Image (tube, grey):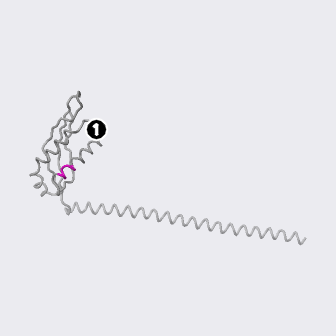
Amino acid sequence: MATNDSQPKADNAESEGDEGKKDSGQRKLSFKLIVMAAIAVLAVAAIGGAGYFFLAGRGKAEAAVAAGRTKPVVFLDMPDVLVNLSSTGGERTQYLRVKVTLELADQAMSAQIQPVMPRLMDAFQTYLRELRPTDLDGSAGLYRLKEELTRRVNAAIAPARINAVLFKEIVVQ
């Protein structure tokens, strides 16, 4: 019987060892859960902090504009341009009419641009006459046109620079 008594004791020892392993497994699981929760909380805090930082910065910039610390932009109207578009042989002639405004950094630039206005008009005319009607298709075509006109204006008035060329009207007939 002594052997029988030793067997149950061994079984009890094994079951106590299993419970010890379960306890440490539960501790490891709860530790992992705590670490994962802490990482999640830190990630949410980092995202929230970054959002606040960027939105607060934007609010300060808007407040600076409202306070009048930034200079307002100046707009200069260019004369209307009417050109015939490039066509291949048998097609009917199509015309392009463009009304453009230049966005300038300050009023002093307007005085710099007025003397070179004939040069700007020439640059516009020669470029626009080379365009085909398909070059103006869609918003991508108009964006390319705006960028090219901005580049040509900046080349003509260098070292001064304009902010943008703005379209008031574009008509293809």
* Majority secondary structure of magenta residues: helix
Magenta residues, as a range? Answer: 150-155
Report the front residue among 80 and 67: 80
Q: Residue furthest left?
A: 115
Q: Residue furthest front?
A: 89
Badge 1 marks a residue whose secondary structure is loop
Q: How many marks?
A: 1
Does 51 sit left or right of 12 as displayed?
Answer: left
Based on the picture, tell me whether residue 171 belongs to the magenta stretch: no
Q: Is residue 84 above or below residue 90?
A: below
The residue sitting at 16% across, 51% down in the picture is 156
Q: Is residue 3 left or right of residue 34?
A: right
Q: Is residue 74 above or below residue 29?
A: above
In the displayed orientation, state which residue is furthest to the top. 90
Quarter of the picture containing the C terminus is top left
Residue drawn where x is 27% and y is 61% of the image: 61
**Residue 8 image position (x, y, % from top left):** 83, 68
| Quadrant of the rendered image containing residue 97 | top left
Q: Compare residues 47 and 128 and report the one nearer the observer.
A: 128
The x and y percentages for residue 13 are: 77, 70
Three-letter residue code for mark 1: Asp
For disc 1, the marked residue is 137
Position of residue 125 measured from the top left corner of the image (x, y, whole percent): 16, 42
Indicate the position of residue 148 as horizontal and vertical percent values: 23, 47
> In this view of the protein, which residue sits in the foreground, 139 or 19?
139
Q: Which residue does the image show at 54% across and 64% down from the upper left?
A: 36
Specify few, some or many for label 1: CA neighbours under 10 Å numbering under 14, 14-19, or 20 or more: few
Image quadrant for the N terminus?
A: bottom right
